Image: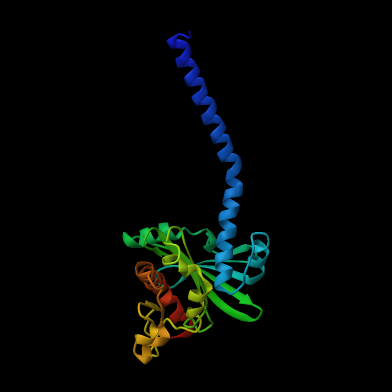
């Protein structure tokens, strides 16, 4: 029969060995995990531009179509520009900005940065805005692509972590995302109004407002509301910049 001291020493050794193995595995796997996260992010950005990328070609397509990564401050000024593999302004790539962190900075009244991507898809120029918000059970996120007028949506992609299958999870389906194409985020006077996900359908809105609405997911009211709130809270951060580009 083993003594208590032997059992105690054996337990300590096993804990140390297991901890070492797990730490080593985590270090070895981290580069692959980081790459997978980056590739998924590229796929989402490209999807908003109507470019369907796979895990094997996402990097090549991103480098081909995303010409500029722009970083903007709350006053609508460009504080970072990354293009052709080098910085022209600033030292932080838009791709590396943590939206959750920047949203927190905004919430507490601190300075914050906003990422923007300029793309040329076979001659169609567009600006892609990353989005982050709250759904029913967890975060919802996505990207919205605007045309050269900084007003008309030319593509959208959305995703989620925990929304209900068949209900809120439907935001990631093509039929929902395609509704956004052609919608506008500003009215005829140039006032920002965003795009609303409407319970009961955009057709119930006044005719003049239907260009700013899409149909909500049936049975997914809270997730739909979360998408509306995400669009409004994220897009309005860029309006000062947009208006400076088109002199609205």
Q: Quadrant of residue 223?
A: bottom left
Q: How is the image coloured?
A: rainbow
Left or right: residue 81 compared with residue 123: left
- Pick whichever, 117 or 18, lies toward us: 18
Quadrant in the picture for the C terminus: bottom left
Q: Quadrant of residue 214?
A: bottom left
The residue shown at (35%, 80%) is 200
- Spot occupied by residue 136 in the image (x, y as percentages of width and height): 36, 62
The residue shown at (38%, 69%) is 220
- Spot occupied by residue 16 in the image (x, y as percentages of width and height): 51, 25
Q: Is residue 107 visible?
A: yes
- Pick whichever, 79 or 236, lies toward us: 236
In the image, residue 37 above or below residue 205: above
Q: Is residue 145 visible?
A: no
- Spot occupied by residue 34 in the image (x, y as percentages of width and height): 57, 51
Left or right: residue 84 compared with residue 95: right
In the image, residue 169 above or below residue 185: above
Q: Quadrant of residue 104?
A: bottom left
The residue shown at (61%, 48%) is 32
């Amino acid at each position: 029969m083993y003594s208590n001291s032997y059992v105690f020493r054996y337990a300590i050794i096993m804990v140390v060995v297991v901890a070492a193995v797990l730490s080593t595995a985590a270090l070895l796997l981290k580069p692959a995990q980081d790459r997978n996260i980056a590739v998924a992010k590229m796929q989402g950005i490209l999807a908003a531009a109507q470019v369907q990328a796979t895990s094997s070609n996402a990097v090549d397509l991103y480098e081909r179509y995303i010409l500029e990564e722009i970083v903007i401050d709350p006053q609508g000024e460009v504080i970072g520009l990354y293009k052709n593999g080098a910085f022209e302004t600033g030292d932080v790539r838009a791709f590396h900005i943590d939206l959750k962190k920047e949203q927190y900075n905004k919430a507490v009244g601190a300075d914050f940065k906003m990422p923007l991507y300029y793309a040329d898809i076979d001659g169609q120029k567009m600006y892609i805005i990353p989005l982050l918000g709250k759904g029913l059970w967890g975060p919802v996120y996505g990207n919205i692509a605007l045309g050269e007028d900084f007003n008309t949506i030319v593509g959208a992609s959305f995703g989620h972590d925990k929304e209900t299958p068949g209900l809120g999870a439907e935001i990631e389906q093509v039929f929902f995302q395609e509704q956004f194409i052609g919608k506008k985020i500003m009215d005829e006077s140039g006032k920002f109004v965003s795009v609303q996900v409407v319970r009961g359908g955009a057709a119930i809105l006044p005719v003049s407002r239907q260009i700013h609405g899409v149909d909500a997911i049936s049975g997914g009211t809270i997730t739909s509301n979360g998408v509306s709130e995400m669009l409004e809270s994220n897009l309005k951060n860029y309006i000062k910049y947009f208006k400076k580009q088109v002199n609205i």
